Amino acid sequence: MAQFTDDPIHILFLNSYNSRMNWYREILRGVEEVLTPDQNNIILHLENMDTKEFQSEEYVQAFSDFIELKYRDNHFSLIFCSDNNAFDFLREQHNRLYPGVPIVFCGVNDFEDSMITDHKEITGIAETFSARTTVETALLLHPDTREVYIINDFLKTGRAWQRDIESELSSLENQLKIRYSEDLSMEELQKEIASLSDQTIILLGVYYSDRNGLFFTYEKTGEAISSVSKVPLYCLTDFNITRGVMGGDVLSGFMTGEAMAGMGLRILQGEFPWEIPPVKAGLTEKIFNYPELERFSIPLKSLPPHSRVINRPYSVYREYFWEFWILMSILILLLVVVIALIVNIYRKKRAENTLRELTEASWEGILIHNRGVALQFNDMFLNLFGYNRDEIQGQQFIDRIFTRESSQKVIDRINAGNLEPYEAMGVKKDGSQFPVEVRVRVIESQGQKARVAAIRDMTDQKKMEEGIRQSQKMQALGTLAGGISHDFNNILSAVLGYADIGLLESEPDGKVHFYFEQILAAGRRARQLIKQILAFSQQSKIQKQPVILNDIIQETINLLYASLPSSITIHMDLSTEICVFGDPVQLQQIIMNLCTNAGLAMKEKGGTLDLVLKECIIDEPSLSDSYLPSGMYAQLMVSDTGCGMTEEVRSRIFEPFYTTRKTGEGTGMGLSVVHGIIAEMSGSIHVYSSEGTGTTFNVILPVCSHGPYDKGENETETL
């Protein structure tokens, strides 16, 4: 709370009783907790009326004169009062002693709003206890209870408390017997309590004086009653909870003091007392005495929620509860970290073993090196080059496993940090050379960077590529020979025909007749030579049969994976199974040529090769073809994202021997052969391309109405 003013703030606190009562001390503690007088320049003047023992009119008048004289030079900003006697005194003397000074009360029994109707400067907190809540709680903790014995004295406050208790417990009278103590001496009351049955509980209200006029503090009253009681003793105020008293839903002096000071603080900050309505709800707290809970075997978990247990034996665990759990949390966290590390080490070792197993299972030679110095390698690497581990481990090896030209190429790539796949010439331990493909990745191990190289023997692939090239040449030759033979046969037909006419019209024994015979013989030899060229180039007869085109495409792509650079990604959409009538080898040759050309177009920068197969109807405008009959066709689209073609190149791609490739990269016969095969199958091929945007080949083939024949039952058509 901020300091209100530079001048001290004077507050009078008038207490009905004496300063020894815990009730008053707890109220005062609550007031000081809220106002913090020392920090806020507040002077709290404390006066105790002690009206439990002194109640005469002469005493009250003398007390009034006393405080008038004592504080005649003080100006009070606020007055606190606790309990009925101080409250009644201030109502009577307010206008005479401290007119206009706001008053905040607490602990007033039987409060009615009419009490302050003519005193607009007064507000506060009524004393409302929870007898019903306490009894209901006791019945839950002691379910065998049949009687409640209630103790109050016969003074003004005791009678007021008994009336309030009777009002609160009236609805329980049909459930159990409720009996109130009579006006007895303390000795008689103790005998009465000692004779109570085991099915009884005691509820202590207010007992300050007995019939003989002997006065007791609230604490002494609780001790006197509990000392002879064999049954649970509950109370309604927190200061009654002493040895032998169970507790209950009790009035809290501290909470009452806090609430009263809070209302006073609002007034000091500018609110008017008549704007703050009196509080009539009880400021209670559920408090229980641990020794009594143990005495009557009541477990803590059976207590109502938010209950507070006092007088528990000292426990290091409770004293350092948060520290204990913080320490346990740290230990648990450390344990989890240790377990996680152990698991991680185990997984790492298992991963290393798995990686080692996978590495050993690879068909490629795996080598991990740092600037050419061998760190780790698999058995396939050793088998590939013919060395043992001791000859390679930790050694500079590039000049030993590559030719001189390739070694320099590898060193230059390492120095440049180039990770692109490359081809080189490997050298085995025995000196023999063989082509290899090297793929490289960089890893970091133990704070050092290293390279992982996968080395693949390219010998078989090179042989296969050479075979494919030879096959393409032979196929091109066959197509060329077919075209030449057609034209040449037409010429020969004219020559041979005129030669036959010449024989008929010439003299048999003449020279002209002999000349015509020689012409016919030469022509026949030329026709036979054409047949031999066709037989040589074709190698075997072409056999047509129903073929699942999807399978042919998949098989061909599997072959091409090894030859296409890793920078090219292949996408296939072959979801529809389509059957065509043709020769499987020729179909494979179509796909091989188209995909090889696409790979060459993307060789420098990489890209994507797409193959899409679907059924189509030739009547669709986008697929219309003037020389194909309408019907169902298979449409194969082969697309690449390569360099594309100019219009001039595109117009000549199907010409035999036309090529834009460098020497050794193509013969110019591939697309010519493809065009011839497709035309022979009654299909068509179109190309769509522009420079820099890639190329798409659209192949249209008739669909076969029935599936492939079983092996041994194939019907073939000989060409």
Image (cartoon, rainbow, N blue to C red):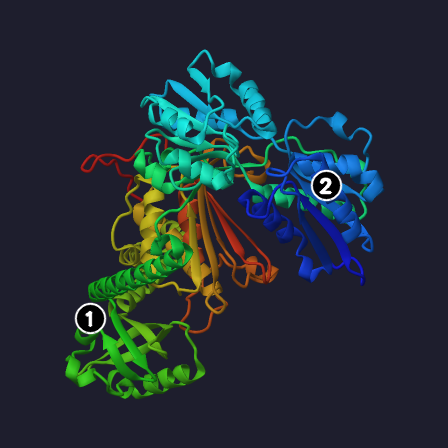
Q: Identify which residue is drawn at 52% across, 52% down.
A: 696
For the residues labelled 2 and 1, say whether their Cβ atoms are less than 8 Å apart.
no
631 up-or-down from 457: above or below = above
Q: Name the image quarter holding residue 295.
A: top left
Numbered mark located on residue 620 in the image: none
Tag 1: amino acid:
Met
Assign the N terminus to one quadrant of the image.
bottom right
Secondary-structure class at tag 2 = strand
Residue at 36 percent of width and 21 percent of height: 145
- Mark 2 nearby-residue class (10 Å; few <14, some 14–19, many ≥20): many
Residue 54 horizontal/vertical position (percent): 63, 39
Q: Nearer the viewer, residue 379 or 346?
A: 346
Q: Amino acid at mark 2?
A: Val
Q: Nearer the viewer, residue 157 or 491?
A: 157
Q: Quadrant of the C terminus?
A: top left
Q: Position of residue 283 (x, y in %)?
A: 59, 36
> In the image shown, does 94 or 584 lie closer to the viewer?
94
Q: Which residue is mark 2?
A: 104
Percent x, y of residue 615: 45, 36
The structure residue drawn at horizontal position 53% and vertical position 34%, both measured from the top left corner, is 208
- The answer for how far apart the CA atoms under marks 2 and 1 are is 96 Å
Residue 658 visible in this rendered orientation of the protein: no
Q: Which residue is mark 1?
A: 380
Q: Can you tell which of label 2 and label 1 is closer to the viewer?
A: 2
80 left or right, relative to 586: right
Q: Is residue 419 left or right of residue 399?
A: right
Question: Does 126 sit above or below residue 533?
Answer: above
Residue 710 lies in what quarter of the image? top left
